Amino acid sequence: MGKKTMIALITLALAFVIYPLYQSYNGSETLKDVGQYYIDNGVEETGAQNLVTSVVVTYRGLDTLGEVTILFLAASVISFFLSFSKNDRIKSRSIRSVTEILTTSTQVLVPMIFMFGVYIFVNGHLTPGGGFQGGAVIASGIILMFLSNPRFKLSHKVIQFVESTSGIVFVLIGAAGALMMDGDFLSNKIPGFGFGEVGSIISAGAIPVIYTFLGLKVGAELSNVLGVFVESQSEK
Amino acid sequence: MLIVLASVLGIASMVGAYFAIHSKSLTVAIIATGVVSLISSILFLLLAAPDVAMTEASIGSALTSAIFFLTLNKIRQTNG
């Protein structure tokens, strides 16, 4: 039997297995218990207008902490494997000249992109988006800075400071909920963070604070990954 | 109307995926993967998931393409 016949047979077998699943699927009209609970009590318990945010930061806050940890690990492993000693640095790397259009448009666009990223994570409890999205948008602004100026270097000290401080603050806010009230880890009921009026910018307790630090942390990590990749270009 | 738009985008993303795999030039392949991510982010938006769309647009098309291009440049440098 040829290779192509085998592939066709395997595809057919897969189709035979998966088709009953498709046949028996019928979407449910009502929400499951957990979803219904979030819709009924989410705004009341977390004060966040955006229910996705209240799930991501408060109800499933531990998962978010895990995601941030995974991202941190990935960034550290990348920097570990791509770092090199000074002796291996190419003395004068030939760099293509950058056009006027790119440099000028970068000067106009980068502040706007950064502002949009900050807007996304500051408004995380009101509108779609949050720490991860805002951080990724900030990192895509950093790409533009690298493109327009190939000699641009990220300060490792600043990145390290932003990254570690925001990580520690995130965990401390989470612990404060567990220690100061009878609440759980990363619960949103922390004294000093009032719920405020639902829908206003200063509301939803600790969620905006957590999302701001999360955005800074994710932005710093993704920018660091990019910076390490750019730096590795000048390794021998 | 929405279903027509979604079908056009879906077909376009399939064409992009074909180019990403079968293109002879690696640069074209990287750009094609970026296009697939961008189209899928619009599809996420049509499916009422704006936050997933934001993540896909910034990480899938911007950051991943940039990292792929940097790696390609590095490979070309080392292979002379």
Image (cartoon, rainbow, N blue to C red):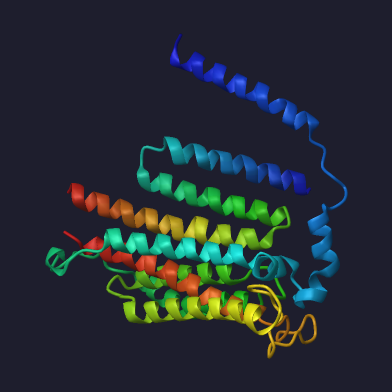
* Residue B65 place in picture, x, y as percent: 43, 55
Residue A169 against residue A27 in the figure, above or below = below
- Total labels: the figure holds 0
Q: Residue at x 34, y 68 (%)?
A: A227
Residue A100 against residue B40 in the figure, above or below = below
Q: Residue at x 74, y 26 (%)?
A: A20
Quick check: A69 left or right of A118? left
Q: Residue at x 70, y 76 (%)?
A: A183
Q: Residue at x 75, y 75 (%)?
A: A46
Quick check: B67 left or right of A124? left
When asked about the image quadrant of residue A16, the answer is top right
When asked about the image quadrant of residue B44, the answer is bottom right
| Residue A115 in view (yes/no) | no
Quick check: A45 left or right of A96? right
* Residue A98 place in picture, x, y as percent: 31, 69
**Most foreground residue, A80 or A91:** A80
* Residue B22 place in picture, x, y as percent: 43, 35
Q: Residue furthest bottom?
A: A192
Q: Quadrant of the C terminus of chain A?
A: bottom left
Quick check: B71 left or right of B61? left
| Residue A119 in view (yes/no) | yes
